[in-house]
Image: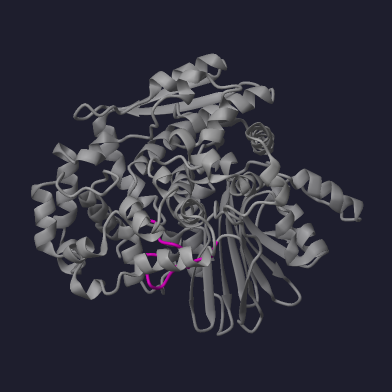
Amino acid sequence: MCGICGEVRTDGQISLAALGRINDAMQARGPDASGLYVQGGMAFGHRRLSILDLSAAAQQPMIDAELGLGIVFNGCIYNFRELRAELAGKGYRFFSDGDTEVILKAYHAWGRDCVRRFKGMFAFALWERDSGRVVLARDRLGIKPLYYTQAPGVFRFASSLTALLAGGEVDTALDPVGLHHFFSFHAAVPAPRTILRGVRKLEPATLLTIEPDGRQTRERYWSFRVGESRPTDRRLSEQEWVDALTEAMMQAVDRRRVADVPVGVLLSGGLDSSLLVALLSQLGHQDIRTFSIGFDAVGGHAGDEFRYSDIVANAFATSHQQIRIPADRALDALPGAIAAMSEPMVSHDAVAFYLLSSEVSKRVKVVLSGQGADEVFGGYSWYPAFLPANDPVDEYQKAYFDWGHTDLARLLSPDMIDEDVSLQFVERFFDDCDSASAIDKVLQIDTEIMMVDDPVKRVDNMTMAFGLEARVPFLDHEVVELAARMPAGLKVKDGGKYILKEVARRCVPHQVIDRPKGYFPVPGLRYLRGPFLDFVRDVFDAAPARTRGLYRRDFVDHMLRQPEAEMSPKGHSRLWQAALLEAWLQTHNI
């Protein structure tokens, strides 16, 4: 896991100073080493977090003079050893022992189709020395980020949006469409848009090729369709589906053990992370290290789930650590967590992950996390309502949107809102799902779109703020493909994640499986009382907020007077969402 950046120009000389600033801005993503490489109208930067092949031979930018190729790479190719053996059989010679060089050889052997062979998470830029062609790629489910900004004659990219800002020459005007999505979709802004007009992000499962003359082509190299089963699938019994998922999850966890450093688990005490611990134990993984976080309770709302994480830790004799966070420390961490966000993120557990990562990174460099299971296996409470739904668009808006268009018009200044572009986005997406059932359409949009730009992005940003690599077995693309083919009832039955619970019954304590669903709670951000409300008030009273003209001040004042009056359908604070965006803009001087 690392930070990458680069610049491709057809209009003059490379701005090496700007690229250096961008690279330096990603130091937290790669604290172990850094490097820059320039060739004609191309320049590339890299910040290294050493996980595989800790030697200098694996430094980046990596150049293969024999093949005439170079690369900067962020992520991990879990099956790199199998690919390396296959490539060695073709006569390729290796000078390092990690996965980065395998990508170079694979590209030379199989061209851009090499990405179809990779099992892992990745964002990389690869260039051909002799032709001047540059190829950028992002993994199938968008686990690794890749942002870019462009103008006539120049294209820049980086692992972080805020790193691009350090290079200058970015249009930082707010994008009204991205803004509408931010408020409607719980801060998720679907690719390629971001909240800023001048920055875009490469879509997951996409290759972007830049020719020497600046021409660009895009290719989607992978897709999945929820509800699209094979003829043989229809004959499978429930037990056979459970067996297939057990095997797939075992492989997914086993793949993510590859590392030359210790691997831990972020153990929330919920079903998902507990299953990861159990599977690691079954694989014979030695010295399983687990970490849990908890906060002070507020208003009777519990701030930890140590009861359940302790059950799992004791059952599998893990080396476990509880990290207790007093309310004032969560408040003190807010500015750092906001600064670590590539894009503004409203979910409370961003702060939890930030604080957890700060402690865990002192002990391990790689962790497994349970993100993605809710979307892939239908774990959210609103999913069962879509089994009989006649109008999935309307039901989805009622269940998911933090702000409806009418409510949003009360908050935003008139020049920042026009059409209901978020509802139109969902309508188009569901129409493209053809004959899929309502529940399959919802699972499709949540896995393909909302998950990528909410929980997955959040975990990447908060862990990488401390040079910690997070791996997500539930987003193994073969697991996602298998889940997509399953009957919806096996996923959303009995309150959700039914089939995952059946897999867990073979190895996880029942108290964890049948417990009420939990999450990473930060009660102070749910209720916004005392110093948390003071923090929000200071954000809105700051000069940039007063002059920006983003919000209708009368409605902001209404929310400040009654901070718990405006809540989303899912019970999240709308005041916090508006304040978080303004705080992010101020933090990054936008």
Quadrant where the C terminus sits is bottom left
Which color scheme did the rendering employ for the protein?
A: one colour
Q: Is residue 416 above or below residue 571?
A: below
Q: Is residue 500 above or below residue 202?
A: above
Q: Residue at x 70, y 42 (%)?
A: 235
Q: Residue at x 38, y 35 (%)?
A: 519
Residue 401: x %, y % from top left:
32, 55
Residue 149: x %, y % from top left:
47, 71
Give 422 or 465, whichever is nearer the viewer. Answer: 422
Give 316 or 151, whichever is nearer the viewer. Answer: 316
Residue 260: x %, y % from top left:
68, 35
Q: In this image, 227 relative to 383: left or right?
A: right
Residue 93: x %, y % from top left:
86, 53
Q: In this image, 164 relative to 34: left or right?
A: left
What stretch of residues is rendered in magenta?
Answer: 187-203
Label the magenta part by its dominant secondary structure. loop
Q: Is residue 101 above or below residue 255?
A: below
Give 294 or 242, whichever is nearer the viewer. Answer: 242
Q: Is residue 83 visible?
A: yes
Q: Residue at x 41, y 60 (%)?
A: 162
| Residue 189 lies in the magenta-colored region | yes
| Residue 398 lies in the magenta-colored region | no
Identify the image quadrant of residue 108.
Answer: bottom right
Q: Is residue 344 visible?
A: no
Give 312 or 488, whichever is nearer the viewer. Answer: 488
- The total of numbered circles placed on residues is 0
